[in-house]
Image (cartoon, rainbow, N blue to C red):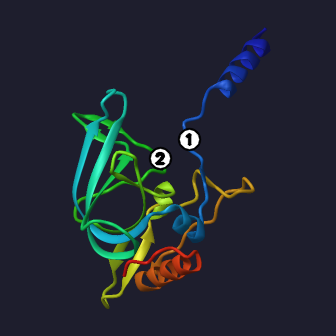
Amino acid sequence: MKRLVSLVLLLALAAMPVGASTFIKMNQKDLVRDSAAVIQGEVVQVNSFWEPTGTVIVTEALVKVEDLVFGNAPSVVVVRTAGGEVDGFYIEAHGFPVFKAGERVLLYLEPERDGHNRVTGYQQGQYQIVRDKAGVEYAVPTYEDAGGLVGADGRPAPVQKTIRLDVLKDSIRGEARRANRILEN
């Protein structure tokens, strides 16, 4: 009887939903294809709020554009993402972009119907910009491991590496040209 109870308990636990997100790995070609613009900029303001239904916290970041890598974008872009903190309630949306005022970022953007933007490919389309002691700028992926990211074959995706910012931007512009995307700069 004890074994039967243990087996039933084990089966019940196995049937419970898992709290994880799975995203399809996007390479640079996919990100460029699915983006209306790629920008480099500084996050000037971050605000979290409950969506109108009151069930989900959303974060809105205002990003001042420093460089339009390709596409069209205003001088300040509004980017929305799931998750954030409001009045002591915190929702962490694993794999979704997270913004901090004052940070510099490179973002692949796709427009939403309401006029706001979202980051293409979730965190895959977000890089932090950092500068070394010599003044060289680097783009650092915002996700540290492939947790939750899978390739088209279903296997875990490889980890993205830090890259010189100028090299990444040149590569993005080259991919946009190959895809016959309109370049605005």
Decide which of 122, 172 is in the foreground and name it.
172
Task: Indicate the position of residue 158 as horizontal and vertical percent values.
Answer: 63, 65
Say which of 42 and 115 sits in front: 115
Mark 1 belongs to which amino acid? Ala
- Near-viewer residue (3 or 36): 36
Residue 180 pos. (x, y %) = 55, 76
Amino acid type of the residue tagged 2 in the rendering: His
Q: Is residue 182 left or right of residue 115?
A: right
Query: 67 above or below 116?
Result: below
The reply, left or right, for residue 154 in relation to residue 117 is: right
Q: Which mark is residue 94?
A: 2
**Percent x, y of residue 57:** 33, 37
Q: Which mark is residue 20?
A: 1
Image quarter (top left, top right, bottom left or bottom right) of the N terminus? top right
User: Mark 2: which secondary structure?
Assistant: loop
Kindly indicate the quadrant of the structure image that contains residue 135: bottom left
Name the outermost residue toward the bottom: 134
* Residue at the image point whose x is 59% and y is 34% from the top: 18
Quadrant where the C terminus sits is bottom left
Q: Is residue 156 above or below residue 141?
A: above
Question: Residue, x 72% and y 53% (percent of image)?
Answer: 154
Answer whether labels 1 and 2 touch (C-beta < 8 Å): yes
Image point (59%, 47%), residue name:
22
Question: What is the crowding at mark 1: few (fewer than 14 residues within 10 Å), some, or many (at least 20)?
Answer: few
